[in-house]
Image (tube, rainbow, N blue to C red):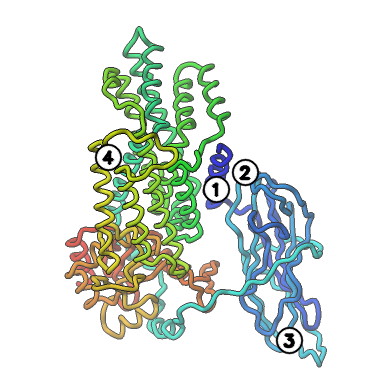
Amino acid sequence: MKKIGLFLFNILLLAMTASAQFAQPVKTAVEMKQVGDNEIEVVMRATIDAGWHIYGNGFPDNGPTQASVHVEKKEGATPKGSLKISGKADRHYDDMFGQEVVSYEGSVTMSQRFTLAGGRYTVAGYFEFGACNDESCIPPQTVDFEYSGEAPDKKAKEAAPDKTQPVADQPALPADKVAEDATVADSVAPAEAQDSVAAVAAANADGDLWTPVIDEIKAFGEGEAAEATNASLWAIFLMGVVGGLLALLTPCVWPIIPMTVSFFLKRNKDSQGKAVREAVTYGISIVIIYVLLGTLVSAIFGPSALNALSTNAVFNLFFCALLVVFAASFMGAFEITLPSSWSNSVDAKAEKTTGLLSIFLMAFTLALVSFSCTGPIIGFLLVEVATTGDWLAPTIGMLGFAIALALPFTLFAMFPTWLKKAPRSGGWMNRIKVTLGFIELAFALKFFSVADMAYGWRLLDREVFIVLWVMLFALLGLYLLGFYRFAHDDEEEEGIGVTRFFVAMVSLAFALYMVPGLWGAPLKAVSAFTPPMNTQDFKLGSEEVRAQYFDYEQGMAAARAAGKPALLDFTGYGCVNCRKMEAAVWTDPEVAKILMNDYVLITLYVDEKAALPEPLERDGKRLRTVGDKWSYLQASKFGANTQPFYVPVDATGHPLAAPYSYNEDVPAYVEWLKKGLK
């Protein structure tokens, strides 16, 4: 099972590295060439930095991103043949992906030909490819193209001028010889999204609603956003502490405590003070190791990518699968471990060194040896805090985790007599692991729900989600009461402990609490995790407050017509705190009255995957989906990229008060809404 652990560890590192904001190692240029009276060729030329390579195609799909061309518009033109790739192809076995691939280094040319019908034509789309070096990969890269012109009538056989047009802002690169090498299929753009063309014209009649107002926002001060951030970081720290305490009680960590403390005491039997100092140093080393891990996650992702993760459907699906694997490991299906050679090597170095370095290496050995128990908890914690969008969150979360994990080693060294009173290892630790497995399964459903809503699959509507959670927590309660056992559980001892009984009672009570949600009960305690109420088909009653508009321009036009201010609600399907605000604050009668009567409420989902009728070009960035459009609006106009983000604006799009972020203080929210009205 060690191979499974290593595989999952590498996949996790790969996914993290793939989101890093590297300087682009591949530089591209695109041009269109007239190759015949009624034939054109769109050519992308790429130069690749030393040590990097991009992948071709013609190998199994379960590997890296293959080179492809996606045609989004083809009016008066038909693709001829398939993608042509030229360059020095290297077909080899790639250890990173575990399969044979085709790659190119130095430079490469990709081209796609089109046959013209005659008359006006337009071709648009993008090339896509993946790039890696020997250690990491960058996200799939896209290079857009769009060309139009007029082709001669085929019967007239008139000569056509050369339409070579390098893409703006991209350097022209030396041409390579174009040769046939591989094939790729066209892809057609998804169905058109909501039509807002008429509303755009009407809304922009009096001015540009997209004009940045960042300076005006700053003039109001930070408002509630700063307080919400501080409160959120404290919550993340406490989440880390809870995770550390749970990891402490697992069979990979708890038995190590008396062994380690005894080692320090025997090593310094003539000096109790020195033993305590070394134990304190050991604890500090544990904190440093895990805090460095959190800092590394922040450094790799960066604040923008961290926020994007919370609403990225692909990453949410990946996290869902990861948590399912962790849950199966905790339930005894297999054990996730790092290669034993790693811990043996570090342990051997610890024995050969002295002083602070030897103690630090001992702490590092603990981190490696206990990975089978701490890994799933750390993975879950980093997934949760990374998707908050705050670059400090992973570091703060790991700080809480490490303090809770390291503190017992120090305390038992200072007060060794406490060891005699500490609980002994036993089957209770295995039950803790299984309980954590159930909890991770429950959270895996939450991540799948984000992707489900973003893509509109409707596979996990609110009532389906609640049914699954009711089953999971009911089964957990029955497990703790001894109604069934897993294969790796110890033989059941006589009787059930009081603590175990109370935990089982809480689990069963929680399952019963969620049952009314099947008929539309708001379930405010879990509203942050369940899909929104509008995904539920059957409701006996609803306290739900819904936006009148989900399009910025349409909503602003309606606000101007009604003579009301607008409240912009930047949210996301994967935004936990957004669901909390909607369930705990918007359902308040006074808040609901103000939102529905005094404002025009406009909700904008930054992770909406529906395609725009036509891609938009903004500041050199191509916006293809509705979510792209609203995410760009929030960043460019208001200088923010986190959700929830509420801002009241007048009919011309200028802010009326400071933005409001996550804060479940209902009176404060009412006061803020009234401030905007004044």
Which of pointers 1 and 4 indicates the residue nearer the eye? 4
Q: Which of marks 4 and 3 is nearer the N terminus?
A: 3
Comparing 173 with 588, the one in front is: 588
Measured Cα–Cα span from mark 1 to mark 4: 41 Å
For the C terminus, the image quarter is bottom left
SS of the residue at dot 1?
helix
Asked if disc 3 and disc 1 are in contact, CB closer than 8 Å, the reply is: no
Rendered residue at 74%/70% (across/down): 82
Determine crowd level at label 2: few under 14, some 14-19, many 20+ residues with C-alpha closer than 10 A: few
Local secondary structure at mark 2: loop
Residue name at image x 36 percent, y 39 percent: 431
Reading the image, the residue beneath label 4 is 500
| Image position of 421 with respect to 104: above or below | above
Residue 295 appears anywhere in the view: no
Q: In which quarter of the image is the N terminus?
A: top right
Q: What element carries label 3?
A: loop
Say left or right for 216 vs 630.
Answer: left
Asked if the residue at tag 2 contacts the one at tag 3, i.e. Cβ–Cβ closer than 8 Å, the answer is: no
At label 3, the amino acid type is Ala
Label 4: element kind? helix
Rendered image: mark on residue 17: 1
Relative depth, front residue between 601 and 181:
181
